[in-house]
Image (cartoon, rainbow, N blue to C red):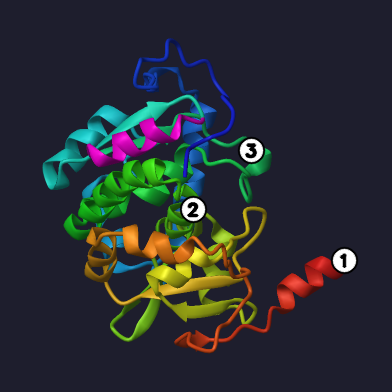
Amino acid sequence: MSVSTRTRRETGPVAADHTISQRWCAYSDCEHGRWDALYRRMMEILPGRACQSFMDATKALKLSDGGIPDFELLSDRLEALTGWRIVGVPGLVPDEAFFDHLANRRFLAGCFIRDADEIDYIEEPDVFHDVFGHVPLLANPVYADFMQAYGQGGLRALKLGRLENLARLYWYTIEFGLIREAGDLRLFGAGIMSSPTETVFALEDASPNRVQFDLEWVMRTNYRIDDFQQTYFVIDSFEELLEAAMQDFAPIYERLANGVAYQPEDVLPFDQVEHEGTQAYFRAKAAA
């Protein structure tokens, strides 16, 4: 759930709340050019695949104005819509600080941008992943409320020792979620939105499962951090996601205490399956 695991550029002092100044003026022309190239590439792929709220917000927030967005200017546009702001961080932050920022409508973003040889794949999230992938949906009022509720839930999960279960919810929705829109599946997870290859894989490849979202099953399901996902969960609306996040998780955590966890490729008898994957991609990778 936290941002970048290493610092790629000089950041200056770190504040008590673990934030830093973006130092927008320090970006090079090459770094701005990398953002522009990534933006153009994704905007050729996402129409017809990304949910409409995401597509609309990229225009409303002016993410194509040229180069890496200035967090202050972008925050002013976003705050006028839903009250959220973007704050820079140098790398990983403590979980409590991470959730506290979300609970107060502050989205944490790494400030470095991937190197030229990492355009197709990067292990840790950079400013393109964090801003292009995550920020547009924060302009959607319902999704914005969900993210705040998630932060509030995270503070409670820390006290109850159930962070692992809550992390799975983040992974399978905020990072890699699908949504049903006008009868078709669309993307909304930031991890997919910022990856040109997973954008196509998640919706169109026969390998992964696509399964109807169920909060408790999501919280029991392990996930991959080193490749595409073997299962993608599908929500019907952001209202469904917000309703799930607003409930009392304590009874669910009690049921999860038995330790039973599902594997990323599992399809369960009670799942509502949109598509049962062949897992061919993953078997081929394992055999290589």
**Residue 245 appears left or right of 128:** left
Between discs 2 and 3, the one toward the N terminus: 3
Which of disc 3 and disc 1 is earlier in sequence? 3
Stretch of the chain drawn in magenta: 92-105
- Give the SS element for disc 3: helix
Quick check: is 62 in the magenta stretch?
no
Residue 96 on the magenta span: yes
Mark 1–mark 3 distance (CA, rounded to whole Å): 27 Å
Q: Residue at x 58, y 37 (%)?
A: 114
Residue at numbered disc 1: 288
Outermost residue, left side: 80
Disc 1 residue type (three-letter): Ala
Q: CA distance from mark 2 to mark 3?
A: 15 Å
Q: Of the residues tagged 1 and 2, which is closer to the observer? A: 1
**Label 2 secondary element:** loop
Instruction: Bin the neighbour count of mark 1 within 10 Å (Cα to Cα): few under 14, some 14-19, many 20 and up.
Output: few
Image quadrant in which you'd find residue 169: bottom left
Give the mark, 1 or 2, whose residue is nearer the N terminus: 2
Q: Are the residues flagged by discs 1 and 2 in contact, CB closer than 8 Å?
A: no
Q: Position of residue 8 (x, y in %)?
A: 58, 25
Helix, strand or loop for the magenta stretch, by majority: helix
Residue at disc 1, secondary structure? loop
Residue under label 2, please give it: 194
Which label number is shown at residue 120?
Answer: none
Instruction: Quadrant for the C terminus, please.
Output: bottom right
Foreground: disc 1 or disc 3: 1
